[in-house]
Amino acid sequence: MTAGVLSFLDIVALLLVLSAGFGWLNQRFLGLPGSIGLLSMGLVSSLLLVVVDMLETDEPLNRSLIAAVGAIDFQSAVLDGLLAFLLFAGALHLDISRLRGRAWPVALMATGGTLLSTFVIGLGLGMASAPLGYPLPLPWALVFGGLISRTDPVAVLGTLKVVQVPASIETDMSGESLFNDGVGVVLFALLVILAAGGEA
């Protein structure tokens, strides 16, 4: 750490240590499925950081964390980095021969299901935001719908290892979760461009 700012390697090391620690805590005390346990503890940790930031503490660690998070280009980190590893991990355990036999159902769910989910969530959020006093323009509501309509192939595969399902359903679910990410990225990018009026 130099000049009170975390470097990229510091951030990677911190994330690895936190992931390992959260994984151990989940395995030892919570007993939740791995992805759900890590997500839950990550959410709690994020909320704690928000509370610490709201307390306006001027501690060096707090300043370093805020500066480090503010310096991360999340679009580049997710689209150019994390997504590739997620898709590779999901494809690594996929039976291609079985996937070929279920190509049409998987393609229909990955495209049609993602589109339907995006528009249902976006329209619902757009209609619900006005009565709550925070009207959200429909294009940006659809951006949110596109953002959360994707599934994590690693989490799906982890769940399928625990739950016994027929082979055809397992192939459909794992294939859809894998291709759903690709469709979701393209859809999200298009919706952001449309919502920003072509300036994005």
Image (spheres, grey):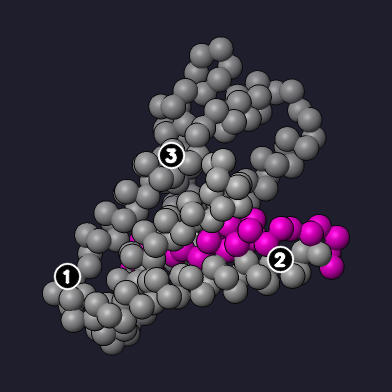
Name which residue type carries label 2.
Gly
72 in relation to 104, above or below: above
How far is the residue under mark 2 from the one under mark 1? 39 Å
Which residue has dot 2 on it? Answer: 126
Which callout, 1 or 3, points at the residue further toward the start of the chain? 3
Residue 96 circle label? 1
Indicate yes or no whether the magenta region holds residue 23.
Answer: no
Assign a secondary structure to mark 1.
Answer: helix
Assign a secondary structure to mark 2.
Answer: helix
Residue nearer the viewer, 37 or 180: 180
Label 2 crowd (10 A; few <14 / some 14-19 / many >=20):
many
Percent of width and height locating residue 42:
55, 50
Q: Closer to the observer: label 2 or label 1?
A: 2
Q: Quadrant of the C terminus?
A: top right
Residue nearer the viewer, 173 or 18: 173
Q: Give the magenta range.
A: 131-160
Describe residue 108's horizontal placement relative to residue 51 as left or right: left
Name which residue type carries label 3.
Ala
How far is the residue under mark 3 from the one under mark 2? 29 Å
